[in-house]
Image (cartoon, rainbow, N blue to C red):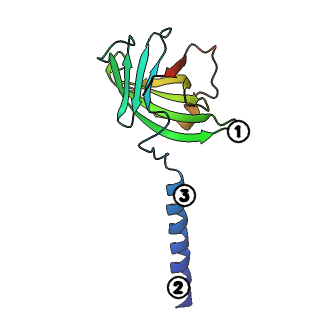
């Protein structure tokens, strides 16, 4: 009888550990008012305007455009503040229309402490058809302005 109770207790302990481990592995749960959300512009970029929201991402060739030329689903997987008060994000994206349709990428993004400037580096990891998996090791390691995949945007008045 004692042996059966010990085994049951051990099994319950192991199941509890597995459950807790699985919960801590999950992604960041985005809030409806994330600092990342909004309209971002820069006339010197190829994509001059971007809108980021809880429902996804839209790219516009020109600041004056009202119709997007590419769209994507996005997911925030991590968020933190550095010692200077800048806000950092790691995100996943999957193109759903336009020139990025079917592509998958991972980004490292930095918002200035004031929330008015956003820098990002994008790492394309493949296409949906290639079934390249999102990988925690595939995020860009730093924000490098010399990277060909670097972008700089400023918050539009929204």
Q: Secondary structure at mark 1?
A: loop
Q: Where 144 falls versus 109 (above or below)?
A: above
Residue 141 percent coordinates (x, y): 63, 29
Name the quarter where the C terminus is drawn. top left
Mark earlier in primary sequence (2, 1) = 2
Distance from label 1 to label 3 (Cα)? 28 Å
Q: Is residue 123 left or right of residue 51?
A: right
Residue appearing at x 56%, y 89% in the figure: 2
Of the pair 66 and 17, the residue shown nearer to us: 66
Crowd around label 3: few <14 · some 14–19 · many ≥20 (10 Å): few
Q: Is residue 16 visible?
A: yes
Is residue 44 positioned above or below 86 on the image? above
Q: Which residue is mark 2?
A: 5
Distance of label 2 from label 1 (alpha carbons): 50 Å
Looking at the rendered image, the disc whose residue lies closer to the viewer, 2 or 1, is: 1
Task: Give the number of the mark in front: 3 or 2.
Answer: 3
Residue 122 at what x, y percent from top left? 52, 23
125 vs 54, left or right, is right
Quick one: 139 or 37, which is closer to the camera?
37
Image quadrant in which you'd find residue 120: top right
For marks 3 and 2, the one nearer the N-term is: 2
Identify the residue at the far front of this view. Answer: 157
Q: Residue at x 50, y 67 (%)?
A: 15
Q: CA distance from mark 3 to mark 2?
A: 24 Å
Give the residue number, with chain letter if any, for mark 1. Answer: 83
């Amino acid at each position: 009888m004692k042996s059966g109770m010990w085994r049951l207790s051990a099994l319950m302990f192991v199941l509890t550990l597995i459950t807790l481990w699985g919960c801590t592995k999950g992604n960041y749960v985005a809030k409806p008012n994330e600092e990342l959300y909004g309209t971002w512009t820069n006339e010197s970029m190829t994509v001059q305007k971007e809108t980021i929201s809880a429902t996804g991402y839209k790219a516009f060739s020109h600041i004056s455009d009202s119709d997007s030329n590419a769209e994507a689903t996005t997911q925030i997987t991590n968020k933190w503040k550095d010692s200077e008060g800048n806000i950092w994000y790691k995100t996943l994206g999957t193109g759903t229309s336009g020139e990025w349709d079917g592509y998958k990428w991972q980004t490292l993004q930095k918002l200035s402490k004031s929330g008015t400037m956003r820098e990002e580096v994008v790492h394309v990891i493949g296409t949906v058809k290639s079934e390249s998996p999102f990988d925690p090791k595939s995020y860009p390691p730093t924000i490098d302005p010399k990277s060909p995949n670097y972008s700089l945007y400023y918050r539009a008045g929204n």
